[in-house]
Image (tube, helix red, strand yellow):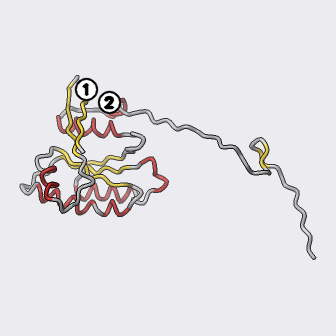
């Protein structure tokens, strides 16, 4: 998939990002190298609820190094996706940071489903690549507000009346 993202950075700097989603490609695909070659930035994405997707990063990172044989790698970020499912996390934050440190990568955590931190991620990458200094408040202003809806389901437990537990009278007989 191919997307175009237009951003306005501090100082009214207009930036256009071309985004190529190659997640569905086989790592052995011949076209894959063409997608990566000449990129100014590469985001290695994984699902925080799947340790297997994290383990696959080694292969993707090695492929990227092969494409940029001259040794000058583009801006490379490690993107942990599905932050909205943190309660199902299979990859620890420490393991994420260890991979970042070992490979000298930039670190991002987002939720593609809710949009949490996605815009901030792209603003940070655009500002880093363009040499424009962007502060944390500048990034936070770009963040989409994530709201949660609280749903109250009808209680079907016979011993709960008006959301208060009542003591049940129990009788026991031993024979």
> Which residue is at a point 21% across and 38% down the rendered structure image?
128
- Residue placed under numbered mark 2 in the picture: 138
- Residue placed under numbered mark 1 in the picture: 10
- Of the two numbered discs 1 and 2 on the same chain, state the one appearing first in sequence: 1
**Secondary structure under the numbered disc 2 in the rendered image:** helix
Residue furthest bottom as drawn: 175
State left or right for residue 138 relative to residue 163: left
**Secondary structure under the numbered disc 1 in the rendered image:** loop
Image position, residue 38 (x, y; %): 11, 46
Do the numbered discs 1 and 2 sit on residues whose CB atoms are within 8 Å?
yes
Image position, residue 57 (x, y; %): 27, 59
Image position, residue 110 (x, y; %): 37, 45
Q: Looking at the figure, which quarter contains the C terminus?
A: bottom right
Q: Quadrant of residue 129?
A: top left
Q: Quadrant of residue 29?
A: bottom left
Residue furthest left as drawn: 70
**What is the number of callouts on the image?**
2
> Which residue is at a point 20% across and 32% down the rendered structure image?
16
């Amino acid at each position: 998939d191919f997307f175009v993202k237009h951003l306005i950075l501090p100082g009214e700097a207009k930036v256009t990002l071309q985004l190529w989603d190659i997640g569905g490609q086989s790592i052995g695909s011949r076209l894959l190298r063409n997608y990566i070659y000449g990129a100014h930035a590469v985001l290695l994405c994984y699902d925080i609820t799947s340790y297997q997707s994290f383990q696959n990063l080694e292969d993707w990172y090695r492929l990227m190094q092969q494409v940029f044989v001259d040794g000058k790698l583009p801006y490379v970020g490690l993107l942990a996706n599905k932050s909205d499912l943190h309660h199902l996390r299979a990859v620890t934050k420490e393991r994420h940071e260890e991979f970042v440190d070992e490979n000298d990568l930039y670190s991002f955590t987002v939720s593609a489903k809710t949009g949490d931190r996605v815009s901030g991620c792209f603003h940070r990458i655009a500002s880093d690549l363009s040499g424009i200094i962007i502060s944390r408040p500048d990034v936070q202003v770009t963040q989409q507000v994530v709201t949660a809806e609280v749903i109250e389901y009808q209680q079907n437990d016979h011993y709960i009346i008006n959301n208060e537990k009542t003591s049940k009278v129990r009788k026991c007989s031993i024979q």
